[in-house]
Image (cartoon, rainbow, N blue to C red):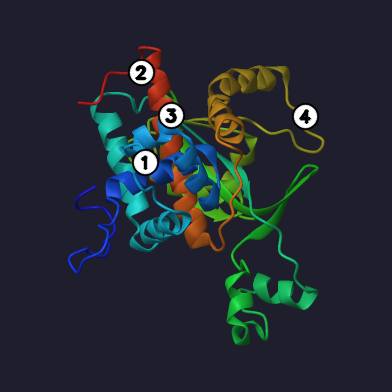
Amino acid sequence: MSGCGPTRRSAARGGRPPFSNGMLFKAVILQALYNISDDQMEFQINDRLSWQRFLGLSLGEKVPDSKTIWLFRELLTTSGAYDELFELFNARLLDIGVITREGSIEDATFVDVPKQRNKKEEDAAIKANETPQGWEDEPHKLAQKDQDARWAKKGAETHYGYKNHVKVDKVSKIITKWRVTAANVNDIEMMLALLDGHDRELWADSGYTKAAYVELLKKYYPDLVLHINEKAEKGRPLTEEQKASNREKSRVRARIEHVFGHMHTSMGALTLRCIGIARAESNLVLRNLAYNLSRYSTLRRLDRAPALA
Protein backbone atom coordinates (compact mmCIF):
# COMPACT_ATOMS: atom_id res chain seq x y z
CA MET A 1 0.00 0.00 0.00
CA SER A 2 2.99 2.28 -0.25
CA GLY A 3 2.19 5.52 -2.03
CA CYS A 4 -1.57 5.28 -1.60
CA GLY A 5 -2.16 4.42 2.07
CA PRO A 6 -3.10 6.99 4.72
CA THR A 7 -0.35 8.44 6.88
CA ARG A 8 -0.18 6.93 10.36
CA ARG A 9 1.74 7.88 13.48
CA SER A 10 5.31 6.59 13.72
CA ALA A 11 6.39 4.48 16.69
CA ALA A 12 9.82 6.20 16.77
CA ARG A 13 9.05 7.70 20.19
CA GLY A 14 8.65 4.27 21.74
CA GLY A 15 5.73 2.06 22.70
CA ARG A 16 4.12 -0.73 20.74
CA PRO A 17 4.72 -0.41 16.96
CA PRO A 18 1.53 0.41 15.03
CA PHE A 19 -0.18 -2.30 13.01
CA SER A 20 0.81 -2.19 9.35
CA ASN A 21 -1.43 -0.50 6.79
CA GLY A 22 -1.52 -3.74 4.80
CA MET A 23 -2.85 -5.75 7.73
CA LEU A 24 -5.45 -3.15 8.66
CA PHE A 25 -6.56 -2.92 5.04
CA LYS A 26 -7.14 -6.68 5.06
CA ALA A 27 -9.18 -6.20 8.23
CA VAL A 28 -11.52 -3.60 6.71
CA ILE A 29 -11.95 -5.80 3.62
CA LEU A 30 -13.00 -8.68 5.90
CA GLN A 31 -15.36 -6.28 7.62
CA ALA A 32 -16.84 -5.24 4.27
CA LEU A 33 -17.26 -8.88 3.20
CA TYR A 34 -19.32 -9.72 6.28
CA ASN A 35 -20.82 -6.28 7.08
CA ILE A 36 -20.09 -6.44 10.79
CA SER A 37 -19.42 -3.76 13.38
CA ASP A 38 -16.01 -2.71 14.69
CA ASP A 39 -16.65 -4.45 18.02
CA GLN A 40 -17.69 -7.64 16.21
CA MET A 41 -14.54 -7.43 14.07
CA GLU A 42 -12.36 -7.35 17.19
CA PHE A 43 -14.23 -10.34 18.61
CA GLN A 44 -14.09 -12.39 15.38
CA ILE A 45 -10.35 -11.78 14.84
CA ASN A 46 -9.72 -13.00 18.38
CA ASP A 47 -12.05 -15.96 17.88
CA ARG A 48 -11.14 -17.21 14.39
CA LEU A 49 -7.75 -18.69 13.60
CA SER A 50 -8.52 -18.45 9.87
CA TRP A 51 -8.95 -14.68 10.18
CA GLN A 52 -5.73 -14.38 12.17
CA ARG A 53 -3.85 -16.33 9.47
CA PHE A 54 -5.38 -14.12 6.76
CA LEU A 55 -4.20 -11.02 8.61
CA GLY A 56 -0.72 -12.50 9.15
CA LEU A 57 -1.08 -12.72 12.93
CA SER A 58 0.53 -15.44 15.03
CA LEU A 59 -1.39 -17.37 17.68
CA GLY A 60 -1.52 -15.29 20.85
CA GLU A 61 -0.34 -12.12 19.10
CA LYS A 62 -2.19 -8.91 19.94
CA VAL A 63 -4.96 -8.14 17.45
CA PRO A 64 -6.24 -4.70 16.39
CA ASP A 65 -9.07 -3.52 18.62
CA SER A 66 -12.31 -1.91 17.45
CA LYS A 67 -10.97 1.63 17.92
CA THR A 68 -7.89 0.89 15.78
CA ILE A 69 -10.08 -0.48 12.98
CA TRP A 70 -12.39 2.55 13.19
CA LEU A 71 -9.45 4.98 13.09
CA PHE A 72 -7.92 3.27 10.05
CA ARG A 73 -11.23 3.39 8.19
CA GLU A 74 -11.52 7.09 9.09
CA LEU A 75 -8.05 7.65 7.61
CA LEU A 76 -9.14 5.90 4.42
CA THR A 77 -12.18 8.19 4.33
CA THR A 78 -10.40 11.49 4.94
CA SER A 79 -7.49 10.66 2.61
CA GLY A 80 -9.67 9.35 -0.23
CA ALA A 81 -7.34 6.33 -0.53
CA TYR A 82 -10.31 3.95 -0.82
CA ASP A 83 -10.95 5.16 -4.37
CA GLU A 84 -7.32 4.72 -5.41
CA LEU A 85 -7.28 1.20 -3.95
CA PHE A 86 -10.43 0.33 -5.90
CA GLU A 87 -8.87 1.65 -9.12
CA LEU A 88 -5.55 -0.14 -8.52
CA PHE A 89 -7.21 -3.55 -8.24
CA ASN A 90 -9.38 -2.92 -11.29
CA ALA A 91 -6.32 -1.86 -13.29
CA ARG A 92 -4.74 -5.24 -12.55
CA LEU A 93 -7.95 -7.05 -13.58
CA LEU A 94 -7.94 -5.07 -16.82
CA ASP A 95 -4.28 -5.97 -17.47
CA ILE A 96 -4.96 -9.70 -17.21
CA GLY A 97 -8.17 -9.55 -19.26
CA VAL A 98 -10.75 -10.16 -16.51
CA ILE A 99 -12.37 -6.79 -17.27
CA THR A 100 -13.19 -7.19 -20.95
CA ARG A 101 -14.78 -3.85 -21.95
CA GLU A 102 -17.07 -5.79 -24.30
CA GLY A 103 -20.10 -4.12 -22.74
CA SER A 104 -21.37 -2.58 -19.49
CA ILE A 105 -24.52 -2.72 -17.37
CA GLU A 106 -25.71 0.10 -15.13
CA ASP A 107 -28.05 0.03 -12.14
CA ALA A 108 -28.35 1.15 -8.52
CA THR A 109 -29.46 -0.33 -5.23
CA PHE A 110 -30.71 1.22 -2.01
CA VAL A 111 -28.46 1.16 1.04
CA ASP A 112 -30.36 1.72 4.29
CA VAL A 113 -29.06 3.49 7.39
CA PRO A 114 -30.67 3.79 10.85
CA LYS A 115 -33.76 6.01 10.66
CA GLN A 116 -33.58 9.46 12.22
CA ARG A 117 -36.20 10.61 14.73
CA ASN A 118 -36.57 14.29 13.90
CA LYS A 119 -39.30 16.87 14.30
CA LYS A 120 -41.12 18.09 11.18
CA GLU A 121 -39.38 21.46 11.24
CA GLU A 122 -35.99 19.72 11.59
CA ASP A 123 -36.70 17.48 8.59
CA ALA A 124 -37.78 20.54 6.59
CA ALA A 125 -34.47 22.27 7.37
CA ILE A 126 -32.47 19.17 6.39
CA LYS A 127 -34.34 18.90 3.08
CA ALA A 128 -33.42 22.55 2.44
CA ASN A 129 -29.74 21.61 3.07
CA GLU A 130 -29.70 23.62 6.30
CA THR A 131 -28.70 22.60 9.83
CA PRO A 132 -31.80 22.63 12.07
CA GLN A 133 -31.95 25.41 14.61
CA GLY A 134 -30.24 24.57 17.90
CA TRP A 135 -28.29 21.54 16.66
CA GLU A 136 -25.01 23.43 16.40
CA ASP A 137 -25.33 24.24 20.10
CA GLU A 138 -25.45 20.50 20.89
CA PRO A 139 -22.31 19.00 19.27
CA HIS A 140 -22.96 15.51 20.66
CA LYS A 141 -26.46 15.47 19.18
CA LEU A 142 -25.22 16.92 15.89
CA ALA A 143 -22.56 14.18 15.62
CA GLN A 144 -25.31 11.53 15.74
CA LYS A 145 -27.53 13.14 13.09
CA ASP A 146 -27.24 12.15 9.43
CA GLN A 147 -28.06 15.26 7.38
CA ASP A 148 -27.16 13.66 4.03
CA ALA A 149 -29.40 10.56 4.00
CA ARG A 150 -32.82 10.88 2.35
CA TRP A 151 -36.12 9.01 2.11
CA ALA A 152 -37.12 7.29 -1.12
CA LYS A 153 -40.00 5.07 -2.18
CA LYS A 154 -39.97 2.39 -4.87
CA GLY A 155 -43.22 0.53 -5.34
CA ALA A 156 -44.34 -0.67 -1.91
CA GLU A 157 -40.83 -0.33 -0.44
CA THR A 158 -39.67 2.70 1.57
CA HIS A 159 -35.97 3.33 2.13
CA TYR A 160 -33.94 5.80 4.15
CA GLY A 161 -30.29 6.25 3.35
CA TYR A 162 -28.22 6.18 0.19
CA LYS A 163 -27.84 4.58 -3.24
CA ASN A 164 -24.93 2.58 -4.59
CA HIS A 165 -24.82 3.33 -8.35
CA VAL A 166 -22.55 0.94 -10.21
CA LYS A 167 -21.40 -0.02 -13.69
CA VAL A 168 -20.58 -3.69 -14.19
CA ASP A 169 -18.51 -5.43 -16.85
CA LYS A 170 -20.95 -7.57 -18.86
CA VAL A 171 -18.71 -10.64 -19.10
CA SER A 172 -17.01 -10.83 -15.70
CA LYS A 173 -19.64 -9.07 -13.52
CA ILE A 174 -16.82 -6.98 -12.00
CA ILE A 175 -17.84 -3.50 -10.78
CA THR A 176 -15.84 -1.07 -12.91
CA LYS A 177 -17.20 2.29 -11.74
CA TRP A 178 -19.34 3.60 -8.88
CA ARG A 179 -21.11 6.64 -7.50
CA VAL A 180 -22.78 7.10 -4.10
CA THR A 181 -25.73 9.46 -3.66
CA ALA A 182 -28.63 10.07 -1.32
CA ALA A 183 -31.48 7.58 -1.78
CA ASN A 184 -33.77 10.12 -3.46
CA VAL A 185 -31.44 10.73 -6.44
CA ASN A 186 -32.88 9.22 -9.62
CA ASP A 187 -30.78 6.42 -11.12
CA ILE A 188 -30.71 8.09 -14.53
CA GLU A 189 -29.01 11.20 -13.12
CA MET A 190 -25.87 9.11 -12.56
CA MET A 191 -25.96 7.47 -16.00
CA LEU A 192 -23.46 9.79 -17.66
CA ALA A 193 -21.26 9.95 -14.56
CA LEU A 194 -20.66 6.19 -14.77
CA LEU A 195 -19.75 6.14 -18.46
CA ASP A 196 -16.38 6.73 -20.09
CA GLY A 197 -14.85 6.56 -23.55
CA HIS A 198 -14.10 2.84 -23.23
CA ASP A 199 -17.75 1.75 -23.18
CA ARG A 200 -18.94 0.10 -26.41
CA GLU A 201 -22.39 -1.15 -25.41
CA LEU A 202 -24.64 -0.33 -22.46
CA TRP A 203 -27.51 -2.30 -20.92
CA ALA A 204 -29.99 -0.73 -18.49
CA ASP A 205 -33.56 -1.22 -17.29
CA SER A 206 -36.59 0.86 -18.25
CA GLY A 207 -35.84 3.38 -15.50
CA TYR A 208 -33.13 4.82 -17.77
CA THR A 209 -35.40 5.62 -20.73
CA LYS A 210 -35.93 9.36 -20.14
CA ALA A 211 -35.61 10.94 -23.59
CA ALA A 212 -33.49 13.92 -22.51
CA TYR A 213 -30.82 11.70 -20.97
CA VAL A 214 -30.82 9.29 -23.90
CA GLU A 215 -30.22 12.26 -26.21
CA LEU A 216 -27.29 13.35 -24.03
CA LEU A 217 -25.86 9.84 -24.29
CA LYS A 218 -26.09 9.96 -28.06
CA LYS A 219 -24.50 13.40 -28.09
CA TYR A 220 -21.48 12.61 -25.88
CA TYR A 221 -21.08 8.94 -26.86
CA PRO A 222 -22.32 8.70 -30.46
CA ASP A 223 -20.72 5.27 -31.00
CA LEU A 224 -22.24 3.75 -27.85
CA VAL A 225 -24.78 1.01 -28.62
CA LEU A 226 -27.72 1.26 -26.20
CA HIS A 227 -29.73 -1.73 -24.97
CA ILE A 228 -32.26 -0.02 -22.68
CA ASN A 229 -35.54 -1.75 -21.87
CA GLU A 230 -38.57 0.08 -23.22
CA LYS A 231 -41.29 1.26 -20.87
CA ALA A 232 -45.04 1.11 -21.42
CA GLU A 233 -46.90 4.41 -21.11
CA LYS A 234 -50.49 5.22 -20.25
CA GLY A 235 -52.60 4.33 -23.27
CA ARG A 236 -49.56 2.94 -25.09
CA PRO A 237 -48.85 -0.64 -23.99
CA LEU A 238 -45.79 -2.43 -25.27
CA THR A 239 -46.17 -4.37 -28.49
CA GLU A 240 -45.27 -8.06 -28.63
CA GLU A 241 -42.10 -7.12 -30.52
CA GLN A 242 -41.12 -4.67 -27.77
CA LYS A 243 -41.80 -7.27 -25.08
CA ALA A 244 -39.64 -9.80 -26.92
CA SER A 245 -36.88 -7.18 -27.28
CA ASN A 246 -37.07 -6.40 -23.55
CA ARG A 247 -36.75 -10.08 -22.68
CA GLU A 248 -33.65 -10.36 -24.84
CA LYS A 249 -32.08 -7.28 -23.25
CA SER A 250 -32.97 -8.53 -19.77
CA ARG A 251 -30.96 -11.72 -20.28
CA VAL A 252 -27.84 -9.56 -20.15
CA ARG A 253 -29.12 -6.78 -17.87
CA ALA A 254 -30.10 -9.30 -15.17
CA ARG A 255 -26.40 -10.02 -14.55
CA ILE A 256 -26.13 -6.84 -12.49
CA GLU A 257 -28.92 -8.16 -10.24
CA HIS A 258 -26.59 -11.08 -9.45
CA VAL A 259 -24.08 -8.52 -8.13
CA PHE A 260 -26.61 -6.87 -5.82
CA GLY A 261 -28.00 -10.27 -4.85
CA HIS A 262 -24.54 -11.41 -3.74
CA MET A 263 -24.12 -8.25 -1.67
CA HIS A 264 -27.52 -8.63 -0.03
CA THR A 265 -27.21 -12.34 0.79
CA SER A 266 -23.57 -13.42 1.00
CA MET A 267 -22.13 -10.11 2.25
CA GLY A 268 -24.45 -9.43 5.16
CA ALA A 269 -27.00 -7.17 3.41
CA LEU A 270 -26.53 -3.66 2.06
CA THR A 271 -26.94 -1.60 5.20
CA LEU A 272 -24.66 0.95 6.85
CA ARG A 273 -24.01 2.01 10.44
CA CYS A 274 -22.10 5.20 9.61
CA ILE A 275 -23.31 8.81 9.53
CA GLY A 276 -22.93 11.19 6.57
CA ILE A 277 -22.32 10.70 2.87
CA ALA A 278 -18.50 10.89 3.13
CA ARG A 279 -18.39 7.83 5.39
CA ALA A 280 -21.16 6.15 3.39
CA GLU A 281 -19.11 6.56 0.20
CA SER A 282 -15.96 5.18 1.81
CA ASN A 283 -17.82 2.18 3.25
CA LEU A 284 -19.65 1.41 0.01
CA VAL A 285 -16.53 1.63 -2.15
CA LEU A 286 -14.82 -0.80 0.23
CA ARG A 287 -17.85 -3.08 -0.16
CA ASN A 288 -17.65 -2.75 -3.95
CA LEU A 289 -13.95 -3.62 -3.76
CA ALA A 290 -14.66 -6.56 -1.43
CA TYR A 291 -17.28 -7.79 -3.91
CA ASN A 292 -14.74 -7.55 -6.76
CA LEU A 293 -12.20 -9.55 -4.75
CA SER A 294 -14.86 -12.16 -4.01
CA ARG A 295 -15.95 -12.28 -7.66
CA TYR A 296 -12.36 -12.63 -8.88
CA SER A 297 -11.88 -15.51 -6.43
CA THR A 298 -14.97 -17.19 -7.90
CA LEU A 299 -13.71 -16.71 -11.46
CA ARG A 300 -10.36 -18.22 -10.45
CA ARG A 301 -12.09 -21.21 -8.88
CA LEU A 302 -14.10 -21.73 -12.07
CA ASP A 303 -10.89 -21.45 -14.11
CA ARG A 304 -12.27 -18.41 -15.94
CA ALA A 305 -9.56 -15.94 -14.92
CA PRO A 306 -5.76 -16.03 -14.89
CA ALA A 307 -3.74 -15.56 -11.72
CA LEU A 308 -2.50 -12.13 -10.73
CA ALA A 309 1.24 -11.90 -11.33
Residue 269: x %, y % from top left: 61, 39
The disc, 1 or 3, on the residue closer to the chain's N-terminal end is 1
Q: Which residue is mark 3?
A: 294
Q: Nearer the viewer, residue 103 or 297?
A: 297
Badges 1 and 4: C-beta atoms under 8 Å apart? no
Instruction: Compare marks 2 and 1 and give the one earlier in the sequence.
Output: 1
Q: Which residue is mark 2?
A: 300
Rendered location of residue 102, percent (x, y): 37, 24
What residue is shown at x 55% (from left), y 45% (from top)?
Answer: 36
Asked if the residues shown at circle 1 and circle 3 are in contact, with their CB atoms under 8 angstroms apart, the answer is no
Question: Disc 2 and disc 1: Cα gap in Å?
Answer: 33 Å
Kind of residue at badge 2? Arg
> Which of the two residues, 18 or 149, is positioned nearer the viewer here?
18
How many numbered discs? Answer: 4
Q: Which of marks 4 and 2 precedes in the sequence?
A: 4
**Amino acid, disc 3:** Ser
Q: Earlier in the sequence, mark 3 or mark 4?
A: 4
Residue drawn at (47%, 55%) of the image: 66
Q: Amino acid at mark 1?
A: Gly
Camera-side mark, 2 or 1:
1
Which residue is the site of mark 1? 60
